[in-house]
Image (cartoon, rainbow, N blue to C red):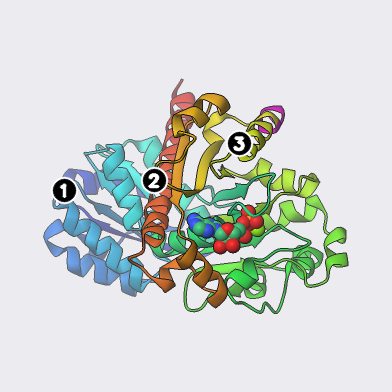
Amino acid sequence: MGQNLNIILIDSEENTRNIIKSYLSELENIQISSECIFEYSDIDEGIKKSFETQNSILLIDISENTEKALESIRKLKDEKKDTLIAALSYKATTDVIIKAMRAGAKEFISKPVIKTDFKETITALIQEIDNKTVNESCKIISTFSNKGGIGKTSIAVNLAIELAQLSKEKVALVDLNLQLGDVATFLDLTPSFAMDYIANNIQNLDDNELLKTLTRYKNTSLYVIADPLNIDKSKEITSAQIEEILQSLKKSFSYIVIDIGTNIDSKTIKALDMSDLILLVATVNLPAIRSIQRCMEMFNKLGYTQDKIKLVLNRYMENEEIKTSDIEEVVKQKVYWKIPNNYLTMMSAINKGVPVNEINQESNIAQNYMDFASKVSDYLITQKLLKDYNKRENIRI
Ligand SMILES: Nc1ncnc2c1ncn2[C@@H]1O[C@H](COP(=O)(O)OP(=O)(O)O)[C@@H](O)[C@H]1O
Ligand SMILES: [Mg+2]
């Protein structure tokens, strides 16, 4: 840690404040001065202080008046995107933790505060500021199917924009259809740099420079890496380069969404390996169901666990001849999500080069994508919590 780091603490319990002060005193380059400690009744002042203080981490108790506390976190995060926040609470239920993280907290600390957990959490946040380590909370989501024309690109694009809007964090959308990608077309972007340039230069790009090579979608926190303009260039890209690019992106992004395409090669397998969640896309018809079976067999061979693969039915219509339960029985996998068939909105979005929520926010498909993004982000948060929990339990044993 190069510079001193300031802690802002909002907690009404004197006991907790003293405990936190003593734990912090054991950490290097951390300071907490008396004017940075606030009672819960002075929450607005605490938030203001956090807004004004550079290099700071806000620790805020949300045990009581949870809604007001979460609203304050949301506002602060809206105005100062890079603020690091850890929420504290006696109510450490999954529901509360997910709400806190949704509002913008990066970490959650259960009360009463346990020394090892507390120090680990603060250290993780410091590392994030230092940007030395890969951001553990960055999650990679891929859309995959061995069939074309099924909706992989539509899902990657619309899910990515919804995740960006929901989380207010940076989301990278990567087109791995290296020969004929269409993510840039779906968003009407003309990228200055594409995957070939980034792959060739990844070793020399620092995080800031890498960010500048991505193409931002309008005024949002969604950034795109498009496929190479020249098809020949795509052959020169290696799986090691893909790995390096994804590792680098993990440092600055909260989500990476990859449109994997249908092609299976060392590059796409690398991306699948690195994914936290693979959305296996299918439509409801026999050939598509057979192809899901084949994909599941392949994932099995690749050693992927069930919790990494989720089945998504696209262009779903009620009263389909083949029932969802039939599909689940055949592929031995629950259907995770259904996206309704809405040809007009979808076509108009593609033709205009915008996500469906810009065509009609109230349409069933735009609403569905919003809910889908919430479900995916809640799932990934829960997975991270489980992982952290198991890690801590192992350390204690
Ligand atoms: N939910 C949907 N309802 C209706 N049409 C859809 C839906 N999702 C995708 N489509 C259409 O299906 C076609 C193929 O989608 P695309 O995302 O390009 O598939 P893939 O990437 O799998 O090849 C597009 O023309 C798109 O408009
Ligand atoms: Mg596609």
Per the image, the residue denoted by label 2 is: 378
Magenta segment: does it hold 301? Answer: yes
Q: Identify the mark nearer the N-term, 3 or 2.
A: 3
Magenta segment: does it hold 186? Answer: no
Per the image, the residue denoted by label 1 is: 14
Q: Identify the mark nearer the N-term, 3 or 1.
A: 1
Q: Residue at x 50, y 70 (%)?
A: 349
Nearer to us of marks 3 and 1 is 3
Count of residue discs: 3
- CA separation in Å, label 1 and label 2: 33 Å
Q: Amino acid at mark 1?
A: Glu
Q: Residue at x 28, y 68 (%)?
A: 75
Q: Residue at x 75, y 67 (%)?
A: 198
Badge 1 density bin: few <14, some 14–19, many ≥20, Cα 10 Å: few
The overriding secondary structure of the stretch rendered in magenta is helix
Nearer to us of marks 3 and 2 is 3
